[in-house]
Amino acid sequence: MTRRPSTAQQLRDLALLRRVRDRIDREYARPLNVEALARGVNMSAGHLSRQFRLAYGESPYSYLMTRRIERAMALLRRGDLSVTEVCFEVGCSSLGTFSTRFTELVGMSPSTYRRRAELGTAGLPACVARQVTRPIRNREAPGAGPPPA
């Protein structure tokens, strides 16, 4: 029989999860992994992953990669760095993994994105361009699944 955590414990866990999410937002370009994030809040990596997914709907790694890809999109729109430089600037250590994940989230390769971004966001304020070009996971894309109930 499993015990349900008290409301107070749930609130403490949510506060810790928020600290993890905030750390990812701040330190996305640094080498981060689930084990290091879990150590920072005195949880096991498995427990952190499960609780993070319950609270935010995705794993800590997925959240980290989304933050990296969002920043990469901004750097690619700026246009003064190569795709390889952008990859390392946002904290990825493998150009292949970066390109694969970028393509999964954005729907096109980083180099294609940069070419299209030069045309598609010309003249838009940066804050508008960022909102319009925010990555959408395949499961979030319109028509990707059944409509919400």
Image (cartoon, rainbow, N blue to C red):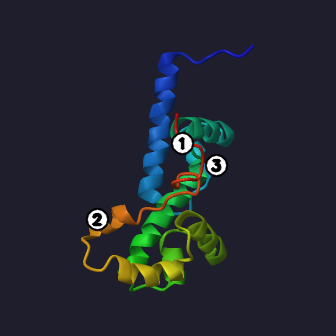
Per the image, the residue denoted by label 3 is 35
At numbered mark 2, what does the secondary structure look like: helix, strand or loop? helix
The quadrant where residue 33 appears: bottom right
Is there CB contact under 8 Å for labels 3 and 2?
Answer: no
At numbered mark 1, what does the secondary structure look like: helix, strand or loop? loop
Up-down relation of residue 111 to residue 37 (above or below): below
Considering the image in quadrants, where does the N terminus appear?
Answer: top right
Give the Cα distance between marks 3 and 1: 36 Å
Can you tell which mark lies on residue 147?
1
Give the Cα distance between marks 3 and 2: 36 Å
Q: Which is more toward the observer, 51 or 106?
A: 106
Name which residue type carries label 1.
Pro
* Pair 3/2: label in front: 2
Per the image, the residue denoted by label 2 is 128
Sequence-first disc among 3 and 1: 3
Q: Judge from the rendering whether residue 138 lies leftward or rightward of residue 74; answer left or right.
A: right
Q: Residues within 10 Å of mark 2 (few under 14, many from 20)?
A: few
Q: Which is more toward the observer, 57 or 17?
A: 57
